[in-house]
Image: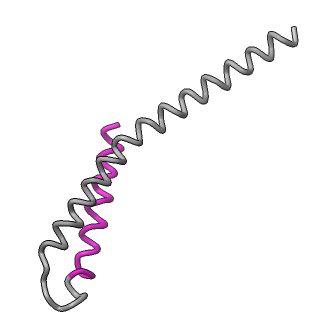
Amino acid sequence: MLSALLKIAVIMSTLLVSAMPAFSGSEGRSNPPDVMIWGFLGLCALIIIAQVAPMISNLKKQTKIAAEQTKSEKAHQVQ
């Protein structure tokens, strides 16, 4: 789980750094609050992803367990 969060953090920081020239060249003037807002929104997205990722993996596990139970029930019905 930690490695996934690390990957997400690296991707988010890479995207933020790569978007900086676009922010600086847009109007020819610096507007620090915009960068702060985008940083805050990125942090919010990171928090949401950190909460959704375990839910998706848990859903995959439950789906796998349900499929195995269905197979075993069908095997018992055939016999």
Reply yes or no: does residue 73 show up in magenta: no
Identify which residue is drawn at 56% across, 27% down.
Answer: 62
Count of numbered labels shown in the rendering: 0
Q: Residue lying farthest right?
A: 78
Identify which residue is drawn at 28% across, 74% down.
Answer: 19
The image quarter containing residue 29 is bottom left
Stretch in magenta: 1-23
Front in this rendered view, residue 45 or 79: 45
Q: Is residue 48 above or below residue 16?
A: above
Reply yes or no: does residue 17 show up in magenta: yes
Give how far across and how far down residue 20 sits, in percent.
Answer: 23, 76
Quarter containing the C terminus = top right
Give how far across and how far down residue 71 sits, in percent.
Answer: 74, 20
Q: Main secondary structure of the magenta part?
A: helix
Q: Is residue 76 above or below residue 26?
A: above
Identify which residue is drawn at 64% across, 24% down.
Answer: 66
Colour pattern of the rendering? one colour
Q: Residue lying farthest bottom?
A: 28
Give how far across and how far down residue 52 sits, in percent.
Answer: 41, 42
Q: Is residue 25 left or right of residue 71?
A: left
Identify which residue is drawn at 80% across, 10% down.
Answer: 76
Give how far across and how far down residue 49 sits, in percent.
Answer: 36, 47
Quarter containing the N terminus = top left
Front in this rendered view, residue 5 or 50: 50
The image quarter containing residue 28 is bottom left
